[in-house]
Image (cartoon, rainbow, N blue to C red):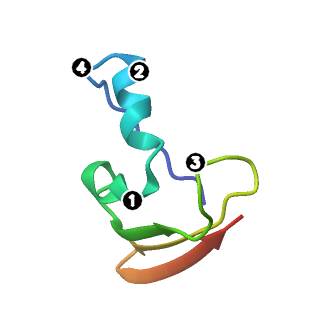
Amino acid sequence: MHVAAEITIDASPTAVFAIVSQPELDTEWQEAAIWTKVRTPGPLAVGSEMDHEGRFMGMRVRTGAR
């Protein structure tokens, strides 16, 4: 299955990155996001861990990422 979407955002790349680089704000820009929580302290970096729950094809799906 391939899922794709495209949108034009009327904001600077810096402003967009300030939002998308904070996983806890996923619900503000991802329609399917229910919640996201970062498990590791400090700023996001390679090796950061988080848990996420979202909706996909009518189901609630929980994932973890490292």
- Local packing at callout 1 (Cα closer than 10 Å; few below 14, some 14-19, many 20+) is some
Q: Earlier in the sequence, mark 3 or mark 2?
A: 2
User: What amino acid is found at the position of numbered circle 2 in the picture?
Assistant: Thr
User: What amino acid is found at the position of numbered circle 3 in the picture?
Assistant: Pro
Q: Earlier in the sequence, mark 2 or mark 1?
A: 2
The quarter of the displayed image where residue 16 is located: top left
Nearest the camera: 4 or 63? Answer: 63
User: What amino acid is found at the position of numbered circle 1 in the picture?
Assistant: Glu
Query: Horizontally, is 48 left or right of 62 in the view?
Result: right
From the image, tell me which residue sits under label 1: 24
Image location (x, y in percent) of residue 41: 59, 62
Q: Secondary structure at mark 2?
A: helix
Q: Residue at x 31, y 24 (%)?
A: 8
Q: Examine the rendered structure and indicate whether residue 58 appears above or below residue 17.
A: below
From the image, tell me which residue sits under label 2: 14
From the image, tell me which residue sits under label 4: 10
The disc label shown at residue 53, or none: none
From the image, tell me which residue sits under label 3: 43
Distance CA(mark 3)–CA(mark 4): 26 Å
Q: Examine the rendered structure and indicate whether residue 33 appears above or below residue 63.
A: above
- Local packing at callout 2 (Cα closer than 10 Å; few below 14, some 14-19, many 20+) is few
Q: Are marks 3 and 2 in contact (CB under 8 Å)?
A: no
User: What amino acid is found at the position of numbered circle 4 in the picture?
Assistant: Asp
Image location (x, y in percent) of residue 31: 28, 58
Please state, as top left, top right, bottom left or bottom right, where the N terminus lies in the image: bottom right
Query: Horizontally, is 32 left or right of 42 in the view?
Result: left
In the image, which is nearer the foreground, mark 4 or mark 2?
Answer: 2
Q: Earlier in the sequence, mark 1 or mark 4?
A: 4
Q: Secondary structure at mark 4?
A: loop
Distance CA(mark 4)–CA(mark 2): 12 Å
Q: Secondary structure at mark 3?
A: loop
Q: Earlier in the sequence, mark 3 or mark 4?
A: 4
